[in-house]
Amino acid sequence: MKRPLVTIEGNEATAYVAHKLSEVIAIYPITPSSAMGEYADEWSAGKQENIWGTVPLVIEMQAEGGAAGAVHGALQTGSLTTTFTASQGLLLMIPNMYKIAGELTPAVFHVSARSLAAQALSIFGDHSDVMATRATGFAMLASSSVQEAQDMALIAHAATLEARVPFLHFFDGFRTSHEVNKIEQLTRQDLRAMIDDSLVHAHRSRGLSPDHPVLRGTAQNPDVYFQARETVNPYYQDCPNIVQKYMDKFADLVGRQYKLFEYTGAPDAERVIIIMGSGAETASETALHLADRREKVGVVNVHLYRPFSVKHFLAALPPSVKVIAVLDRTKEPGSAGEPLYQDVVTSINEGLAEGSVPYAQFANRPYPRVIGGRYGLSSKEFTPAMVKGIFDEMLKAEPKNHFTIGIVDDVTHTSLEYDPDFFIEMPETVRCVFWGLGADGTVGANKNSIKIIGEETDNHAQGYFVYDSKKSGSVTISHLRFGPKPIRAPYVIGQANFVACHQFSFLERFDVTKYAAPGAVFLLNSIYGPDEVWDYLPYQTQNSIIEKDLRFYVIDAYDVARQTGMGGRINTIMQTCFFAISGVLPRDQAIASIKDAIKKTYGKRGEAVVKRNFEAVDQTLENLYEVNVPQEASSQISRRPPVPSEAPEFVQNVLGTMISGEGDNLPVSVFPADGTFPTATTQWEKRNITLEIPVWEPDLCIQCGKCCFVCPHAVIREKVYEPAYIEGAPENWQAEDARWREFSDMKYTLAVAPEDCTGCGLCIEVCPAKDKSQVGRKAINMAPQPPIREQEKVKWDYFLNLPEVDRTQFSLRTVKNSQLLQPLFEFSGACAGCGETPYLKLLSQLFGDRIVIANATGCSSIYGGNLPTTPWAKNLAGRGPAWSNSLFEDNAEFGLGMRLTLDKQSEHARELLPQLSGIVGEELVNAILAADQSTEAGILEQRKRVALLKERLNGVDNPLAQNLLSIADVFTRKSVWIVGGDGWAYDIGYGGLDHVLASGRNVNILVLDTEVYSNTGGQASKSTPRAAVAKFAAQGKGMPKKDLGMIAMAYGYIYVAKIAMGASDQQTLNAFLEADAYDGPSLIIAYSHCIAHGYDLRKGLDQQKLAVQSGAWPIYRFNPSLIDEGKNPLLIDSKPPTISLEQYAYNESRYRMLLQSDEQRAEALMKKAKQDVEGRWALYRQMAAMHYDGDENEHPPS
Amino acid sequence: MVDISTTYLGMHLKNPLVASASPLSKNLDTVVDLEKVGISAVVMYSLFEEQIIQESLKLDSDLSRGTYSYAEALDYLPDYGMYSIGPESYIDQLRKIKRTLSIPVIGSLNGISTGGWIDYAQKIEQAGADALELNLYDLATDVNLTSNQLEERHINLVRDIRQKVNIPLAVKLSPFYTALPQFASRLVEAGANGLVLFNRFYQPDFDLEELEVVPNLVLSDSNELRLPLRWIAILYGRVQADFALTSGVHSGNGTLKAMMAGASVAMLASELLKNGIGRIPEILAEIETWMVEHEYESIDQMKGSMSQKSVADPAAFERANYMKVLSSY
């Protein structure tokens, strides 16, 4: 049978099978498995049927624990059920996994294996998560490639039905889940043939039904639990044979033969590596390469890891083996060895002891030496060179055990050395590397290219894409391989035949030609033509081009894009160049294929888009030039250091190396052992990601501070200062008289950080000051950055060195004043125009020197805490927010724990202090205990007292004194802020959030509400409003948005504010001040416009205003303190709706998409959404109008 | 019994009241109701090529924004559906209306590219429209564009569409042409069967608080009738086309005036948007009552009866009119 050849990624290959073989699919987004759920949701939304002719029911749950619970319930009532997850999500499923396995329930969980959060979170791939489930009783089946991910998915679904053991099918996160590869796609008939319906019926018949009632889930006592737990043994004994049976059946059907343990290499191998996952492909290919060169090496690829069949494992080993190296892609600190290593040691020991080894001669040989090692944690590259390094190590008389490979461990010296220049790539495989900017569409075009090559030529093709951790101005590197033979190379390209750099500015930051092999092609997007470009290249690039004898091409893709209306998207232009130069297809055919791909990708978005792309393709080749490369490098330009020379040593040596993309080379010793990193480091990472920055017009400025207030990246700031500072100011320094009563004789300057700005334009949009003679000119306007960069840098540095204003000298209660405060959250990697970060920046300005932050996993933990640099900063006194991220689900509890420490230590300090009055002095004791810290001045005074206290306690030989000294800082007021997004607050963390709010403790919770799971790509949360489209709600969310504020208000003693900065900055400021002042739990729900809403974020503040005006987002404050004053606690700060919901919603594609794809449903949902708005408004109005005893008048909403 | 039927673009209509291009035709139920209450034909809302292009580019831009930049979120919106970005939803609506109604349905089109005009015109014809109204909404803001060039472009456009489309063509014009009669007759030579006078431009307003230019939609009032009334009266009999008067038709009297100037039909939208479609039977009754009272037998009888050709004082439509108005103060 001829099966289609498709070029897809591992997630799609797996989900394809899972969707076809399931009835119920319960999902929850988590990287890197989210795409599997998204595919399933998309296919069900598109009415695609499973092999039984019905559309699987896909449901998004509130957490992975919930998904596992739903899966368990569906299984128990007889559904064929699956789920997709990874990492922490899998950990949350563990309790149910024990249940599902304990009840012998056929099921398959598909897992894109990922690191676990330990010293840090990592989204990348290793086996830490799946290894944590190995005791649950699930069978564990590993795939090593995209093709296998599909095939093993089917084998798992088939085998579980017969084995009655549930299966965890896993493959490497990102490396396999996100690798695009050409595979043979199974047909519906294949799937049909592999599934035995009688087993399906048996599963259903075991389902709970009142028609044949049984009871499961009993509680058992010491008398029987043990015995009952042993009843499952036969099922586990049979399981490996059943899996092998289905592998054999699969081979008969499809032709690809798999084994539980698959051996590759020399038949007489003496050195054998045991490994599973994608690393097995690399190891196997390397072993074959070496075996061809007469090295006695081999590899056992473990497919069925649980139940671990000793018999099958030993049978797979060549009898000649002398040394075994077991590679684990996980770390189990404190263990005798990592899990697979231990299994291998145990198996060999058992096999030899029991004589069950099938090869008598092997049994009579000396006991093979077994060593274990760790590799590839968090998607660390695992290359043939490393495999060779391990094989070489195995030749030694005393090979290192418990080794690591791929890193330099200069602390405990576990790492093996290897030759990084060892390559085994097939010469006929073409290897291409593309440097792109996230926004320029490079990755999308490369995905299309690899599909074109994979599906329109006989070539095999592979694509893998590497991203940095920034959400704005991010750098992408695409690795494409194609050639006549299957590509089994799950590692990035080291020696490319073709290197393209789609951004000229990368040349000054990165060594882009490091991937180029001698004689390769180097294609550069350049505003400089073929005759002038050479002089603009850094010296190092020139040298590399000459030394490697590169063929050098240039195109001004941005010019072509401009001419053809493509804006900044150069993807199809650069793609056309690639095909033209590489010659992988005849030129005309390539262009036709590119156009075909454009039509497929963009066709449904309208003819205009297709047309523009076509024009771009057509105009490309006449603008592509080969450059005559001179014989000598002559450039005066040098690559810039990643951080300036004045940066601290750690930043220079460690973070700087990471910034330049060379973090793989850093040894273990440079890292803190406990995951603790310095704050205030984004200031050293000058990214220069925008071509336009705001420029101040002092004559128009009214010094309102609004631009600073809304700036998501803290790049626009204001200061008032003594006029004396004007002297010595740099050239072109601008200043005006300060317009403050308190600072009437001082100067005012608004400054912009030219290298940190992202060019979002929010400041321009919010600026209210317009030129009376030319209203298009405001007090700040965008201007090209390159010509003014150096001048503005000097001004910015001078500005930073101006003294900060004395916080005690003015009220913080106005927006204007608040922006004189130093931001202690700056230059994050958030999206340009982010709607969340302005709130965090305000938080840092108001209370930053005395707050500790618990941050839920999500966007804010990524731009807040993803290395290399961190935006949380410090003031001159060295104070600033202390920040930590625990998990996604536990953040409220995590923050509460912080509060409990402060409360307990405070209580204890207050107990100790009076006891030490003899040392400290009565007066100071009383002053500290009675201090009023409700104002900045009060806090400052208390800080001075505490300093004096510490001075007096210091060196006192008294245990009580030393005890107090260690916690004395707690006397100064500190706040706990618990920060996270709506996915956390409304869904996964809601139980904890509710409990923490209910506790009455003095914590402040800030929900940055984007109405979707932004960080994982816009999946629906319970905050998603009705009628909006989101992933997992592709047909528009049918249920209304959960009213979290109303739920919290129901407690009566929780301060609740719903805010939207764009609608009322003053109300936002008030809410922060009131929440912090309130001695009890506070909840602020902040409207955060988001890239997932589908519009230009430059208009984010306008949309916030419209959201409030339409009633979609009423703003209010509920202050329980007012109840004590006999007043109604609820103050509605917005007016009754003045515009229709459509006037707000239909500016955003998340709503418009539904209108464009299913007008009828869009209208029906919009009608209901309007009812939601009206109903909510009516309810609030009634609540706000309720009469409280102390009210002089009933107060309707203002 | 008076005969209020009329003929427009070769179509026999039971009365001269036609629903002009407006949001009313976006809703099938409303159009059905319009027919029920007596409207004689419906002009669909306009299909704007520019809007289609903008929609397409906006959707593409929104779906592409931020994609493939960050490993955890390779995109942000579920790009699963098929979108009605092109003219399809308009064509579908036209088809539905045509299927449901027995009165004539006239498509309305505003293009920006020759290809777009022709392509969409053909699609409208294929969807079953009885006629097509070309909405020449074109604000000449380019200081280098001459009136000749502009007019030539429009003439060529009508000629091109005429060659590709067989259904009757009407051209809806703005009043801002220096030599309207000559231009009108050239349009007819190029293939226009009817002229619709006049298109109303929605003039933007200034917001003095925000210092912004803001869109401002103001519905017509009956005073606006006079401009098209005058020009139809001038053109009637001189330019061999059917005329539709639009802008300012709010009553039976307005309709009667339109007919007397030489219009075949009176098109109305503002009155229906403001006071509901129940105005149609009322206006029809007003027309019939006036005709009975004044012993008119048919619309045909009065058509063009007060056109410039037919009145005793043709100068009344020309400069003298202006003088008279001033001297009356």
Image: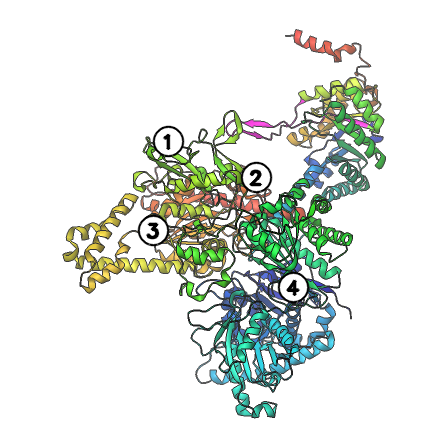
Q: Which residue is drawn at 14% across and 57% down?
A: A918
Q: Tag 3: residue type?
A: Arg
Q: In 3D space, how far apart are the residues under numbered discs 2 and 4 (Cα atoms)?
A: 37 Å
Q: Can residue A1064 be seen in this view?
A: no
Classify mark 1: helix, strand or loop. loop
Distance of mark 3 from mark 1, alpha carbons?
Answer: 29 Å
Q: Residue A128 in the image: x percent, y percent?
A: 50, 70
The percent coordinates of residue B269 (x first, y second) are 69, 30
What are the residue bounds of the magenta stretch? Answer: B194-222
Q: Do the residues labelled 2 and 3 touch (CB within 8 Å)?
A: no
User: How much space separates mark 4 and mark 1, taking CA atoms?
Assistant: 65 Å
Which residue extends farthest left? A918
In three-dimensional space, the C-alpha distance between marks 2 and 3, rounded to whole angstroms, equals 47 Å
Reading the image, the residue beneath label 3 is A879
> Which mark, by number, is residue A1140?
2
The label on residue A739 is 1
Is residue A729 visible in this depiction of the protein? yes
**Three-letter amino acid code of the residue under disc 2:** Ser
Q: Are marks 3 and 1 in contact (CB under 8 Å)?
A: no
**Horizontal side of residue A120 vs A114, given as left or right:** left
Q: Where is residue A961 in the image (x, y as percent from the top left)?
A: 20, 61
Which quarter of the picture shows residue A60?
bottom right
Mark 3: which secondary structure? loop
> Which of pointers 2 and 4 lies earlier in the amino acid sequence?
4
Q: In which quarter of the image is residue A207?
A: bottom right
Quadrant where the C terminus of chain A sits is top left
Which is more foreground, mark 3 or mark 4?
3
